[in-house]
Amino acid sequence: MSIKGVVYKGAHEVAVEDVPDAEIQHPNDVVIDVTSTCICGSDLHMYEGRTSAEEGIVFGHEAMGVVDEVGDGVDSLDVGDRVSIPFNVACGHCKNCEEGKTGFCTNVNPEGSVPAGGAYGYVGMGPYQGGQAERMRVPYADFNALKLPDEGHEDDFAMLADIFPTGWHGTELADLQPGESVAIFGAGPVGLMAAYSAKIKGASEIYVVDRVESRLDLAEEHCDATPINFEEGNPVEQIIDANGGEVNKGVDAVGYQSVEPDAVRDSDEPYDPAKENPGVLINQLIRVVEPKGQLGIIGLYVPEDPGAPETISEMEAQGRLGIDFGKFFEKGQKIGTGQCDVKSYNRYLRDLIVAGRAEPSFVVSHREDLADAPEMYDKFDDREEGVTKVILEP
């Protein structure tokens, strides 16, 4: 038996094809009928051919749905339960999981290229078929699945698998405290969620840096943020001028595919790899954050970039960046990095949604049929105006 899923066919090409049906493989598994599954910026790294992903992998690590099958060893879940599935696959009982670091589980990825941690539908992150499909297997289900109310908030809850917790994680890595100011580089879905988290936490001033006006508008409208368009001038200078000095904390929500403004590398394309400068944002954060401040790095950085554009140096293609470490040392700053441990945050963010104190679905621009995935990948990859977060509905 087969189901429909989003399959990687090669650089800049996905297709919706028949893929193996999800099934119980271990007594602690459940299988869910997927009701919402999102396209993530991290998926674009594979989509663009920037990883070692092989053709045939089923994409998708942001999913929620309804439990359809339950393994004999599962105690807390029943058929019909509505659940959110963290993108991290975690066992719940290794050293890292016991310490709450579920993004770095040591038991779920024995053969992958990543030293610790597993995820659905992602290269090097274990043998877990992705959630951009009609059905999905969830291992260690008692630990991994988060129960949701039976109805309502579908688009809000769809943000719990990754981007809302990841945005919150960025502010945690930066140790953002109430009343502090923060600069957030990137107004994609994760950057917007970091800004929204900063607002909920009581930040005094929030600056969001990007070049896509529709995304900056969302930051201003929903996050009470000051938008900073880096095409209009040096973002460090813009922020310091607006704030009357350096900010307390900073978050990088872009990662290694950060780009220079058009004035630096001439191009009319909305997104052009030739404009990439993998270390530029970290260096800008070092300069815009005050001495003794803290940086949270949630944008993805990779140990190798096999699809790197020719403008990237061999050093940068190997994940080694030209960071202004002397300035970082001089300012006595701290830095926190790494993927989000979703389970540390998702139940509390769920409860904020249920209580009406958070509506992260403001980032959702499109809800489309699963069959429309190829078109939506193309639009999202081009960073088109008005395309912020895409939910696919199987």
Image (cartoon, rainbow, N blue to C red):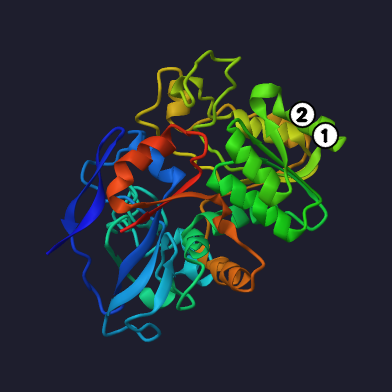
The residue where tag 1 is placed is 242
Question: Which three-letter amino acid code belongs to the residue tagged 2?
Answer: Gln
Q: Position of residue 136 (x, y in %)?
A: 29, 64
In the image, farthest residue toward the right:
244
Residues at discs 1 and 2 in contact (Cβ within 8 Å): yes
Q: Is residue 184 left or right of residue 67?
A: right
Question: With respect to residue 247, does 121 lie above or below?
Answer: below
Question: Which three-letter amino acid code belongs to the residue tagged 1?
Answer: Ala
Quadrant where the N terminus lies? bottom left
Is residue 46 at all visible to an observer of this figure? no
Tell me the element at label 2.
helix
Image quadrant assignment for residue 327: top right
Q: Position of residue 371 (x, y in %)?
A: 27, 49
Q: Position of residue 251 (x, y in %)?
A: 65, 44
Question: With respect to residue 252, does 102 lie above or below?
Answer: below
Instruction: Please state which of residues 284 and 372 is positioned toward the viewer in this rendering.
Output: 372
Question: With respect to residue 323, does 28 lie above or below?
Answer: below
Characterize the local packing of mark 1: few (<14), some (14-19) or many (20 or more) Cα atoms within 10 angstroms: few
Quadrant where the C terminus lies? bottom left
Image quadrant assignment for residue 55: top left
Disc 1 versus disc 2: distance between alpha carbons?
6 Å
Tell me the residue at 83%/30% (across/down). Answer: 241
Q: Is residue 364 left or right of residue 232?
A: left
Image quadrant assignment for residue 360: bottom right
Q: Position of residue 382 (x, y in %)?
A: 43, 31
The residue where tag 2 is placed is 238
Q: Is residue 337 left or right of residue 54?
A: right
Is residue 349 at all visible to an observer of this figure? yes
Q: Which label belongs to residue 78?
A: none
Tell me the residue at 49%/25% (across/down). Answer: 270
Instruction: Please state which of residues 282 and 45 is positioned toward the viewer in this rendering.
Output: 45
